[in-house]
Image (spheres, rainbow, N blue to C red):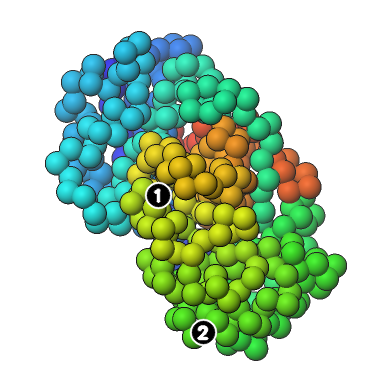
Amino acid sequence: MKITNVYEGVVPISSSIRNAWIDFSSMDCSIVAIESDVIRDGKPLVGYGFNSNGRYSAGEILRRRVLPRLTAAEPDSLLDEQGSLDPAKAWQVMMRNEKPGGHGERSVAVGVVDMALFDLASKIEGKPLYRYLSERHGDGQPDDSVFVYAAGGYYAPDKTLTDLQDEMRGFLDLGYDVVKMKIGGAGLAEDLRRIEAVIDVLDGDGSRLAVDVNGRFDLATALEYGRAIEPYGLFWYEEIGDPLDYHLNATVAEHYAGPIATGENLFSLQDARNLIRYGGMRPDRDILQFDPALSYGLTEYLRIQDMLGRHGWSSRRCIPHGGHQFSLHIAAALKLGGNESYPGEFQPTGGFADDAVVEKSRVGLTDIPGIGFEGKAAFYKVLRDLHS
């Protein structure tokens, strides 16, 4: 197996929405296509990758460092002992001559390519990624469906409480039982009104609502909000302060009895391990949201899972950020606790196969070989145009 061509581009995923920290008016995303010399049905197999949402495209790092190393590598250096494509060996090639630390946008660039390599490797084997991954890194018996929750509830110009409620009713109509909304972008009194409006839609059941701060709060504000929202019995209180402020997170965990969720902006094994060591996370109730697409790819995510197991964490406490099909496969293969979903945002990259059906907040997987981007018509057209 040889890589014959690599293509890199950018796709916009911009929107007028905002959370407590940023707006998405100029958000974009890197995409990659890796073409091989393996021919099926008269065409070369191609692996596709993209960098999830919430981080901008990483084209400069891809073009100047990551992709040149990959294309210059001896073909055999990318293969395992059986002669099959080995994404872990390719990962080592992409990270040559990179110093430790500095995991920001570099991890995003490597993650894009790592995703495309796993897509290609499982296509070569003729298997959907979740089966390919379960056989190599799981127990060989992947979950046949995955818990998903609907993320939305963003701030937007002229958005009323009625609009927010209608949005959440739309998620329920799509088959979701659990929803998530943003807080921290308004004052406490207004956010409480917004929370109560959504709980009304959920028949008064706060345990079906998660709230997300996107890292905005200092410690005093985090504790103030925690005291105010704890009586609602929420599904979780997410990314309360700066993702690297482990002391803040640990202090909130001492005072807030409900579940805390965080980790989507930690992009390496080392940062994930520091969260477990110093962030006060409680393995009986809290949720870890590391995004495999952003954190150096699935290769690094597997290392994170090994670390969590050594620290006594169940894989079921992991629900990745991102709301995309890549993490859906990973969740089924590694028996994670679920996966995020964005029914109305971050198109064309976000979401699952066009024929996916959510029922009681669970969704099945496609049996298309690889990740199954071919089952997302709008996104697949973008990917095909990249190398056509």
Type of amino acid at the residue the image marks with label 2? Thr
Q: Is residue 355 left or right of residue 53?
A: right
Distance (Cα) linking label 1 and label 2: 28 Å
**x 55%, y 35%: residue:** 334
Q: Position of residue 332 (x, y in %)?
A: 60, 35
Give the residue at mark 2: 221
- Count of number-bearing discs: 2
Q: Residue at x 60, y 68 (%)?
A: 237
Amino acid type, mark 1: Leu
Is there any visible trace of residue 344 in the rendered image? no
Picture quarter with the N terminus = top left
Q: Residues within 10 Å of mark 2 (few under 14, many from 20)?
A: some
The residue furthest left is 97
x, y (%) of residue 333? 57, 32
Instruction: Say above or below: 260 vs 6.
Output: below
At label 1, counting other C-alpha atoms closer than 10 Å, the crowd grade (few under 14, some 14-19, many 20 or more) is many
- Image vertical order of residue 1 relative to residue 176, above or below: above
Residue 294 is marked as 1
Q: Secondary structure at mark 2?
A: helix
Report the front residue among 155 and 77: 77
Residue at 58%, 76% in the rendered image = 255
